[in-house]
Amino acid sequence: MSLTPEQVLAAHKANLETLMGFTQQAVAGVEQLIQLNLAVTKAAIEDSHKNTQMVMGAKDSQELVAMQSTLFQPLAEKMMAYNRQLFEIVSIQGGAVSLGVEQKYAQT
């Protein structure tokens, strides 16, 4: 079976459109990751400033030791929230790419 130049051109055009779709999806995923990381960094800076102020205001070592638990518990919760959001972004992006590949495979 021989393909005409128009068929080859149409196939190349379809492949380029598919590639552009995947590229746009990847860029959207990277954008979401950047936004997440910027929000986490901003919150970390604010927390660091607040925690430094608390530590500087400690009157004695006992008060400082008592502060440790209040400083570290939110950190673990924030790490878990970050990991959940990261997993969500990766899952959504991976699912979108998988769906696109499946659709393209079904077309061919």
Image (cartoon, grey):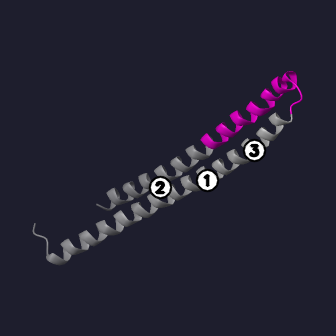
Q: Earlier in the sequence, mark 3 or mark 2?
A: 3
Tell me which amino acid carries mark 3. Answer: His
Circle 3 SS class: helix
Q: Position of residue 7 (x, y in %)?
A: 20, 74
Q: Residue at x 79, y 43 (%)?
A: 50
Q: Nearer the viewer, mark 1 or mark 2?
A: 1
Q: Position of residue 79 (x, y in %)?
A: 65, 38
Image quadrant in which the C terminus is located: bottom left
**Does residue 68 lie above or below 43 as drawn?**
above
- The residue that disc 3 covers is 49
Q: Residues within 10 Å of mark 1 (few under 14, many from 20)?
A: few
Q: Residues within 10 Å of mark 2 (few under 14, many from 20)?
A: some
Image quadrant in which the N terminus is located: bottom left
**Does residue 69 lie above or below 53 as drawn?**
above
**Does residue 40 lie above or below 108 as drawn?**
above
53 or 66: nearer the viewer: 53
- The residue that disc 2 covers is 96
Q: Residues within 10 Å of mark 3 (few under 14, many from 20)?
A: few
- The residue that disc 1 covers is 38
CA distance for labels 1 and 3: 17 Å
